[in-house]
Image (spheres, rainbow, N blue to C red):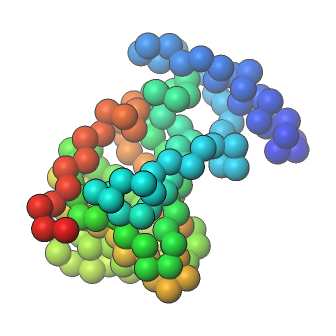
């Protein structure tokens, strides 16, 4: 099915989320159709992201999925949040600080971040793109707690 038809399917299936999204229907979300968020709040760093699945934006529940994009040497400052998270490297490279330990992220690598683990990201010289996800209903429900020393 061509991408243009997939997007039509997504619009038909995910037109308006319900308050609790108790009965979601399947849908397709196309990355290029999602708005770019972030990149303007120095508390976060200079990372931008695009949300693909989130109950506050799509007719879904139980999962949040997006793609984060970093310029060369871009950062997401050290922070914590209650739900566990995963990163899956797509392009470029970088370093994830995970509870004080540097972990490399490259295309094809998956990183599991436990609940409340302090973590942050620094992209390499060509930038970095990765998918991220949470087992939560909506991205807006995740409280980021940034570390004091930035």
Along the viewing direction, whichever of 51 and 90 lies nearer the viewer: 51
Q: Is 101 on the left or on the right of 8, as rendered?
A: left
Q: Is residue 117 visible?
A: no
Above-or-below relation of 28 to 77? above
Query: Residue at 36% of width from left, 53% of height from top?
Result: 41
The image shows residue 56 at horizontal and vertical percentages of: 46, 27
Along the viewing direction, whichever of 110 and 131 lies nearer the viewer: 131
Q: Is 80 on the left or on the right of 142, as rendered?
A: left
Query: Residue at the bottom extreme?
Result: 125
Query: Residue at 50% of width from left, 86% of height from top?
Result: 125
The image shows residue 120 at horizontal and vertical percentages of: 29, 66
Q: Can residue 47 be seen in this view?
A: yes
The image shows residue 12 at horizontal and vertical percentages of: 74, 21
Along the viewing direction, whichever of 58 and 34 lies nearer the viewer: 34
Query: Residue at 55% of width from left, 82% of height from top?
Result: 126
Q: Is 1 on the left or on the right of 80, as rendered?
A: right
Give the quarter of the image for residue 6.
top right
Give the quarter of the image for residue 26.
top right
Q: Is 38 on the left or on the right of 118, as rendered?
A: right
Instruction: Indicate the quadrant containing the N terminus: top left, top right, bottom left or bottom right.
Output: top right
Above-or-below relation of 111 to 103? above
The image shows residue 31 at horizontal and vertical percentages of: 66, 49
Instruction: Indicate the quadrant containing the C terminus: top left, top right, bottom left or bottom right.
Output: bottom left
The number of numbered discs placed on residues in the rendered structure image is: 0
Query: Residue at 50% of width from left, 53% of height from top?
Result: 49
Query: Residue at the left extreme?
Result: 148
């Amino acid at each position: 099915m061509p991408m243009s038809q997939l997007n039509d399917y997504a619009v038909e299936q995910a037109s308006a989320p319900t308050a609790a999204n108790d009965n979601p229907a399947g849908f397709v979300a196309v990355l290029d159709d999602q708005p770019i968020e972030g990149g303007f709040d120095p508390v976060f760093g200079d990372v931008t992201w695009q949300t693909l699945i989130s109950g506050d934006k799509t007719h879904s529940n139980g999962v949040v999925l997006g793609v984060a994009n970093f310029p060369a040497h871009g950062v997401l400052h050290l922070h914590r949040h209650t739900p566990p998270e995963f990163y899956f490297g797509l392009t470029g490279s970088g370093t994830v600080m995970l509870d004080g330990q540097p972990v490399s992220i490259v295309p094809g690598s998956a990183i599991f971040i436990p609940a409340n683990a302090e973590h942050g990201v620094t992209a390499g010289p060509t930038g970095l793109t990765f998918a991220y996800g949470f087992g939560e209903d909506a991205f807006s429900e995740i409280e980021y707690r940034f570390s004091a020393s930035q």
